[in-house]
Image (spheres, grey):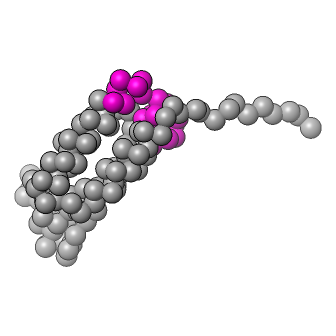
Amino acid sequence: MGAVQIGQPALQHEELNLGSATLSVTVQIYDIFHLHELIDYCHERFSFVRAIPNLVHLSIPDYFNVQHLPNDLKQMATERLIALRDRLVQAWRTAGLNQIDSVLTYLGMGEHAPSAPRSTTQV
């Protein structure tokens, strides 16, 4: 198979001998409020991509950790994720809901306490 040229139509997954694919997405402060858009896009656009990606909590660098969100924003993110989960259940699209449940659990774990700074001594 040759290189794909700009302007050519994208290859279909069958042409690439790709039966299915799974996306892995980091969940962090800047995207927690838009996960529903990604999941909706996967549901609407692809038949070969697992509709709910692996959702990986981003904790390095520490300031991206969603547990740093103020409580009102954590509540807003929780409400959006619960609404998304409920909508998926009503549409019988339940494969992968454990990924959303994991994010909900992580958000509800309380305040994030960053690691204590390490002190070093010269020997």
Chief secondary structure of the magenta portion: helix
Q: Does 27 appear above or below 93?
A: above
Name above or below for residue 57 compared with residue 62: below
Q: Which quadrant does the N terminus fall into? A: bottom left
Find the magenta span and give its range.
58-75
In magenta segment, residue 25: no
Q: Could you tell me which quadrant the C terminus lies in?
A: top right
Q: Vertically, is 80 above or below 100?
A: above
Examine the structure image and report whether residue 68 is included in the region drawn in magenta.
yes
- The residue shown at (38%, 51%) is 102
Is residue 73 in sight in this rendering? yes
Q: Position of residue 56 (x, y in %)?
A: 40, 50
Q: Is residue 45 visible to the viewer in this orientation of the structure?
A: no
Image quadrant where residue 92 sits: bottom left
Is 72 positioned to the left or the right of 117 in the image?
left
Q: Classify residue 32 by image quadrant.
A: top left
Residue 1 in the image: above or below residue 101: below
- Between 26 and 76, the residue placed more toward the observer is 76
> Residue 118: image x %, image y %?
73, 34
The residue that appears at 20% across and 41% down in the rendered structure is 83
